[in-house]
Image: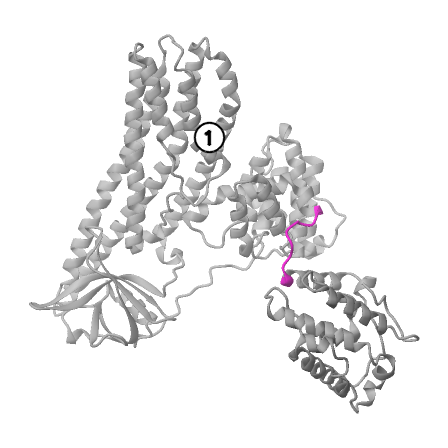
């Protein structure tokens, strides 16, 4: 749908996919630059040529209508869709004004031409300069790398070390230039959403003041103008938030790029030089190689970074063995040999460094030592969703709602970190936490209390709305229809664990109270979404794409606040799956006594011996298996095929014989019919013998709509014969 996100981690690999993505962003910038130049030209013609005003306005309107925004990511927010739709709205307004003659437009150059020229020169121009620098560094790095790799291994060690250091410096500089270029491209793509549309909005506003006939049109346009202004401001606010996050991520990548690598489907990937035999000798061809350990597949793509194109067809082989190449056996450094199952001979490859060779050898299970480079980056939080945690949140909420609900910037203004940590240490102390009646002292400022609440939620081992549901919530927020968004989020909330849902309900009820006082505290639902979105719904992996989805995290929180009564107090309309239904029943059975329909039906006294119980079940199950395996129609017409199995010599089964000698037959007939039907219907499933488990717990049977009328009638007939007068009962035998 939109442009793919440029990941900083891809700058280090510099893969073909990264280059193609970068080219698409560059093409979009060139397209925007050309469009802005054309728009500026049309605007000047509109100002200077009053005679050609109608024609110029038509052309200007057509230009606006033809341009389409390309947003980063696979979906757009309502604000972005509003901004993208704005150009078409502007074109419609201009076409309506074409029939009217107007006076000379004053100050149009200042409100329209200057900002666009400034954006084109300062932003797009800066991106072009960064591209030139990036292309220059790419050529320089590739040249030095090729020269370095062609050094003979017989040179002095000091010379080799000096050459290695030089290559490392050039590589690090190339990596930094690449990161800065990607950052600038991302920045310009985001800036154009508001710095490009905002001057157009100002220009149209100026035109309305000079139109006598345009007064009524301006009133009709005012609603969309308000919506667009809010969308632009929201987009600007999101940009400021995401820009700082992206810049912070870029700095982390500069400091330690290995810790922030993107999770790849491949075990190892990167550039390798492959030795190829030619008629005139041997040559080393640069390939982008990937290796998958599970399938042992090595894929080699000949690719030239300088030209940005492939040098031949892709080749895939199956790994047989990998052996390090000794330095004294070849003039090249960092070499290793690979044997393939489906290719004769040995493939000699050259890595980019000794460390790179070690990683390749480790991935391919070569003879190099195996190092475990995995590191558990997830620190275990000290906060928990236990009684202490609920007590802390309730105390904070009570303090805010009683003392500071009308404070401006509530939850947006942060407290002093040392004070926040001190308050948390007091609240989390088991001695004070057990005192549920004790409120937070008035000496603590409201901003300290709100910061403590947010900090405690961030200290949890995982986000309150859980990593495993993060993508599902984001997808729900990306749905086009608002009703569908609410419905999907409603269903997802009820899939959260009980404690998570209770804590989320407690928090959303409180935030709804805060939003109801937004005229005093200035914290609208949208502002609260910005504050709590990254806290409650943060992603497990920090990437540029995840940062771009922050706006959808905020939308999820907004929906939860606005619809908290429906979401938390009603059951979602979406039907639960069998696994979810079983889990919900298990939880309910653990937390409350069974109802009449859930209690087991006792038809006879249970045996104390486990061996006898197992023997009885085996006899009954074997009887059922014989029935299910036969033809359903023949079983329905016969009532005596099951009697031999029921005449077992087990004395414990004598209780069954006199009380229901014929009642099992119609039930088994129905069950056999059901089993035959289930063979042709993948939605149905039934396990033989389950109705006899747990002392005839027939009250918990679920009747599916696919069961035929014969089956329902047989079930009813069986239940009518099950009751034994005088037998102890713990509940009703009919559901």
Position of 254 relative to 722 (above/below): above
Main structural element of the magenta stretch: helix, strand or loop?
loop
Residue 115 at x, y percent in the picture:
34, 24
| Rendered residue at 25%/41% (across/down) | 131
Depth check, front residue: 269 or 629: 629
Q: Position of residue 584 (x, y in %)?
A: 69, 60
> Is the residue 524 above or below the residue 566 in the image?
above
Quarter placement of the N terminus = top left
Image position of 401 with respect to 603: above or below: above
Residue 276 can be seen in this image: yes
Residue holding disc 1: 232
Give residue 297's position: percent from left, percent from top: 32, 69
Viewer-closest of 478 and 517: 478
Using the image as rendered, state which of residue 456 and residue 98 is in the foreground. 98
10 Å neighbourhood of mark 1: few (<14), some, or many (≥20)? many
Furthest residue in direction right, as rendered: 726
- Give the color scheme: rainbow, by chain, secondary structure or one colour: one colour
Q: On the image, which quarter does residue 289 sit in? A: bottom left
The reply to whether the magenta stretch includes residue 283 is: no
At x 16%, y 64%, the residue is 284
User: What's the magenta region?
Assistant: 569-579
Q: Given the current orientation, which residue lies at the most extreme left position?
A: 280
Q: Quadrant of residue 84?
A: top left
Let me know if residue 576 is in the magenta part.
yes
Which quadrant is the C terminus positioned in?
A: bottom right
Q: Residue at x 13, y 64 (%)?
A: 151
Badge 1 marks a residue whose secondary structure is helix
- What is the x, y in percent for residue 586? 70, 64
Residue 497, compared with residue 113, is above or below; it is below
């Amino acid at each position: 749908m939109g442009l793919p996100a440029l990941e900083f981690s891809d700058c280090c690999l510099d893969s073909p996919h990264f280059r193609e993505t970068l080219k698409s962003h560059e093409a979009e910038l060139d397209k925007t630059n050309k469009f802005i130049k054309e728009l500026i030209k049309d605007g000047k013609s509109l100002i200077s040529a009053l005679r050609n005003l109608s024609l110029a306005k038509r052309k200007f309107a057509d230009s606006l209508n033809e341009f389409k925004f390309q947003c980063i990511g696979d979906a757009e927010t309502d604000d972005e869709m509003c901004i993208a739709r704005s150009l078409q709205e502007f074109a419609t307004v201009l076409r309506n004004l074409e029939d009217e003659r107007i006076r000379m437009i004053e100050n149009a150059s200042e409100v329209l031409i200057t900002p666009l020229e400034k954006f084109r020169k300062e932003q797009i121009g800066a991106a072009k300069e960064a591209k030139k620098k990036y292309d220059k560094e790419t050529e320089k790095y590739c040249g030095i790398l090729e020269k370095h790799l062609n050094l003979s291994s017989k040179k002095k060690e000091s010379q080799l070390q000096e050459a290695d250091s030089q290559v490392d410096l050039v590589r690090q500089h190339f990596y930094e230039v690449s990161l800065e270029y990607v950052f600038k491209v991302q920045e310009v793509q985001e800036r154009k959403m508001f710095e490009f549309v905002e001057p157009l909005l100002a220009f149209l506003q100026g035109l309305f003041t000079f139109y006598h006939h345009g007064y009524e049109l301006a009133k009709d346009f005012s609603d969309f103008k308000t919506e667009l202004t809010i969308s632009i401001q929201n987009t600007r606010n999101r940009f400021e938030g995401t820009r700082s996050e992206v810049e912070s991520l870029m700095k982390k990548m500069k400091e330690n790029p290995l810790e922030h690598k993107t999770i790849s489907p491949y075990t190892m990937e990167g550039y390798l030089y492959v030795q190829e035999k030619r008629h005139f000798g041997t040559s080393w061809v640069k390939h982008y190689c990937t290796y998958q350990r599970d399938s042992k597949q090595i894929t080699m793509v000949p690719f030239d970074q300088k030209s940005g194109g492939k040098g031949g067809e892709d080749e895939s082989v199956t790994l047989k063995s990998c052996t390090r190449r000794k330095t004294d056996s070849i003039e090249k450094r960092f070499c290793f040999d690979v044997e393939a199952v489906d290719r004769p001979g040995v493939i000699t490859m050259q890595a980019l460094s000794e460390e790179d060779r070690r990683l390749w050898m480790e991935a391919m299970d070569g003879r190099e030592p195996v190092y475990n480079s995995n590191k558990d980056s997830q620190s275990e939080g000290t906060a928990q969703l236990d009684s202490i945690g609920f007590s802390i949140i309730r105390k904070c909420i009570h303090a805010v709602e009683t003392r500071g609900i009308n404070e401006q910037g509530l939850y947006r203004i942060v407290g002093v970190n040392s004070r926040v940590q001190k308050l948390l240490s007091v609240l989390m102390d088991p001695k004070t936490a057990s005192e549920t009646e004790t409120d937070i002292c008035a000496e603590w400022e409201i901003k300290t209390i709100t910061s403590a609440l947010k900090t405690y939620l961030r200290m949890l081992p995982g986000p309150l709305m859980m990593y495993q549901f993060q993508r599902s919530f984001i997808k729900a927020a990306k749905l086009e229809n608002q009703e569908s968004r609410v419905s999907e989020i409603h269903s997802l909330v009820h899939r959260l664990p009980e404690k998570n849902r209770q804590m989320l309900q407690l928090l959303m009820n409180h935030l709804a109270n805060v939003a109801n006082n937004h005229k005093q505290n200035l914290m609208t639902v949208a502002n609260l979404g910005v504050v709590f979105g990254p806290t409650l719904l943060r992603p497990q992996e920090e990437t540029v794409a995840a940062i771009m989805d922050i706006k959808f995290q905020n939308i999820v929180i907004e929906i939860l606040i606005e619809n908290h009564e429906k979401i938390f107090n009603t059951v979602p309309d979406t039907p639960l799956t069998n696994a979810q239904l079983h889990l919900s029943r298990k939880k309910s059975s653990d937390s409350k006594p069974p109802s009449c329909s859930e209690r087991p039906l006792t038809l006879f006294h249970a045996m104390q011996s486990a061996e006898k119980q197992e023997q009885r079940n085996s006899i009954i199950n074997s009887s059922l298996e014989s029935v299910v395996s036969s033809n359903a129609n023949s079983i329905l017409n016969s009532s005596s095929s099951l009697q031999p199995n029921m005449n077992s010599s087990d004395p414990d089964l004598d209780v069954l014989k006199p009380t229901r000698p014929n009642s099992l037959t119609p039930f088994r007939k129905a069950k056999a019919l059901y089993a035959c039907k289930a063979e042709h219907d993948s939605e149905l499933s039934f396990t033989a013998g389950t109705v006899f488990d747990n002392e005839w717990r027939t009250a918990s049977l679920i009747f599916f709509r696919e069961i035929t009328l014969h089956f329902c009638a047989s079930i009813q007939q069986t239940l009518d014969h099950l009751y034994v007068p005088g037998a102890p009962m713990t509940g009703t035998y009919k559901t």
